[in-house]
Image (tube, rainbow, N blue to C red):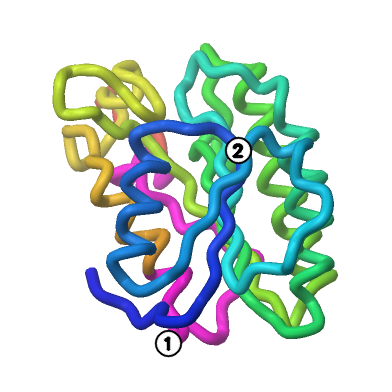
Amino acid sequence: MKVDLDGRAALVVGRDSAVIEAVVAALITNGAGVSRRAPADTVNTLVAPDLLVVAHDLVAEGDAADVEALVAAADRIGEAMQERGGRVIVLTASFGLLPARRHAVQSVATARTVAAMRALAMRLGPNVQVNAVGAGAIEDGEGGFLAGGAALLSHVPFGEAGTIEDIVHAVLFLADPMNSYMTGQVLTVDGGWGAGYGRNF
């Protein structure tokens, strides 16, 4: 996917992963200048970016401990962006919209992430658009999962896991200057997992 990000400064904070590496590569390929700072609580003084990507843990068994630090970083950097405008894109798991019984802790933490993203969108509009990508079961190409987990697949209408490229394309869509009237939304990339209970009774 190609979008015009020439001259835009991007900042990435949060969890490092193969997904984030692919997102960074795509932003650079599309013309953005990308800087990395992690963990989130080290981001204090900075020149406000045009594009902020906040990366939460995406796997079902992940550590939800850094949610508060990432939410605080998004708030702080988003406020700094407000004068000249920009985009905040939050990468999170789809459990924030539809809790998973076997992953209660991660579901609650992700719901907190989604609620914070929407509150930030209300506060920073109209100058800053704030949206999220909600990742479902995303494979690494070698049988492992970079987001979600294998248990989700029996509920996915597509019947298979997604790829890193599926997440990258969603991020680029939210970053695209042509996408100018969308904020406070979660773009779910989950093969339809969140559409409803997919098993046959």
Q: Residue at x 15, y 20 (%)?
A: 142
Would residue 156 be found to the left or right of residue 127 on screen? Answer: left
Q: Earlier in the sequence, mark 2 or mark 1?
A: 2
As drawn, 65 above or below 132: above
Quadrant of the snapshot with the N terminus: bottom left
Q: Which mark is residue 14?
A: 2
Question: For this view, does 86 lie left or right of residue 159?
Answer: right
Say if the magenta span includes residue 179.
yes
Judging by the rendered image, the residue that carries numbered circle 1 is: 178
Q: Amino acid at mark 2?
A: Gly
Label 1: how many residues lie within 10 Å, few (<14), some (14-19) or many (20+)?
few
Which residue is more in the foreground, 197 or 88? 88
Q: Which residues are magenta?
A: 173-195
Seen at 55% across and 33% down, the residue is 15
Residue 13 figure quarter: top right
Q: In the image, is 83 to the left or to the right of 107?
A: right
**Residue 91, percent from left and from top:** 52, 46
Q: Which structural element holds mark 1? A: loop
Residue for point 34% across, 24% down:
152
For this rendering, which residue is in front, 34 or 168?
Answer: 34
Is residue 189 or residue 68 the one in the foreground? 68
Relative image position of residue 38 (x, y in whole percent): 63, 37
Left/right of residue 160 with respect to residue 179 in the rendered view: left
Helix, strand or loop under label 2:
strand
Of the two numbered discs 2 and 1 in the rendering, the one whose residue sits closer to the viewer: 2
User: Amino acid under label 1?
Assistant: Met
Quarter of the image holding residue 168? bottom left
